[in-house]
Image (spheres, rainbow, N blue to C red):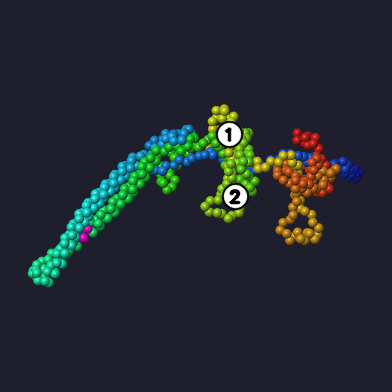
Amino acid sequence: MRKNNTLIYVLIVATLGLIGFVYIKGQSKPKGEEITVEKVSKRTIKEMVGASGKVFPETEVKISSDVSGEIVELLVEEGDSVVAGQLLCKVDPDTYKSMVERGQATVNSSKAQVANSASGIARSKAQLIQAEAQLEQIKSQVENQSDIHNRNVLLHKEGVISQADFENSEAALKQLQANFRSIEANVKTAEANVESAEQSKRAAEFTVKSSQASLKEMTTSLKRTTIYAPMGGIVSKLNIEQGERVVGTAQMTGTEIMRIANLNSMEVQVDVSENDVLRVALKDEVEIEVDAYLDRKFIGKVTEIANSASNTGTSISLNTDQVTNFIVKIRIDPDSYKDIVQKGKKFPFRPGMSASVDINTETQQDVLSVPIQSVTTREEEKDEDEEEVKKKKDEDEIKEVVFVMSADTVKMVEVKTGIQDDENIQILSGLEEGEEVVSGPYSAISRKLKEGMQVRLEDKEKKKEKSK
């Protein structure tokens, strides 16, 4: 029994000692939320828009064939340097030579038809002249015989000439009149023949023009069997080998044979979201990182901003969940990679290389700013009447605030913010230079801190010991 009582006494004393130790420890523990602070100061802030994309030549020409056939000569290889007007390759011209010869023969035949028509016109005109001369001759004969017959009519009435002479005179007049009508008809026929011959000549001339146009088209097709470089540059892509067949038509794109690019002038094409593209402007300075060059940044400028979204095709999707991006083109400044060129690498960038960019959309120098994590949001406090009104609204009113150090407590101050970078954010109103604002930890700033809450500064020495 004595042993049991002694054990109980020992346990009671130990418990009381433990409670006293915890109490003393709690009294000695620093009070308040542990925080870090930073002074409001003036800084230079660069607002950046990040995006990623690919490297492309600013100028790249796709060369396709306008005619179909076999590649009988291929005079360049991928990577070769070419100049404008240089012969690149030849398509088999034999078929097109035959077409040109056939077209030339058609033109000659059409010209011969024109010549025959001209001869027909000459013959028809000669016949017309002859018929007109005969008509004049018979006309004078009819007039002469008409005068004779008129006199014979008077003489017949007076009984000077016999009935037989009168009838012979009348018959001669009628015969001449019939001959006159016949020759007059011949004149009209000759005139019709002349007009018909002239129309035949015009038709033959049109045939000549048509055959000449066909010949010109065939000659053009023959010329297109030899393909020349439209610009100087580098053969960046070669899609065919000698002996392969290519398809070419004038109405649509033929087989792509190769691409020629100017690798001296390169650009980065990136997708920028619709939320950021309105902040991007032409000539904005850009920092470019190319995956092929580690720990190296290049400089560029925005040269083109798309007016239509890159994912807008022939059909417009009305689904708002779809990501909408706009293509922005950025020219890489040759001075930013001049040292690489000087080391012997004439073309440091190749089409299709991956790249990421930071576009400097706005720069503000010597502006009041705080660490970006110092700014948080709180719901605006309202009284009971306002709370009833609040319930009728769709969204609560949110304000941006920072917590300013005041002795061992914090004061919540509403602020208005401007541009921001990765570390700092501009303060437009609410703070003055030199004030100390809470900069960490983020969990305390975002949720725990309240107006007048007691705080204490973080023990940096203890933090260093823990980190070790």
Local packing at callout 1 (Cα closer than 10 Å; few below 14, some 14-19, many 20+) is some
| Vertical relation: 4 (above or below) 262 | below
| Vertical relation: 86 (above or below) 145 | above
Judge left or right: residue 426 versus residue 215. Answer: right
Number of the front mark, 1 or 2: 1
Which label belongs to residue 334? 1
The stretch in magenta equals: 183-187
Q: Nearer the viewer, residue 421 or 175?
A: 175
State the residue at coordinates (36%, 39%). Answer: 92
Number of numbered discs present? 2
Mark 1 element type: helix
Which label belongs to residue 324? 2
Q: Are marks 1 and 2 in contact (CB under 8 Å)?
A: no
Label located before the other in sequence (1 or 2)? 2
Q: Quadrant of the C terminus?
A: top right
Compute the Cα span from label 1 to label 2.
Answer: 31 Å
Which label belongs to residue 150? none
| Percent position of residue 352, x then y | 54, 39
Residue type indicated by callout 1: Pro
Mark 2 element type: loop
Local packing at callout 2 (Cα closer than 10 Å; few below 14, some 14-19, many 20+) is some
| Percent position of residue 85, x then y | 44, 35
Q: Is residue 255 visible?
A: yes
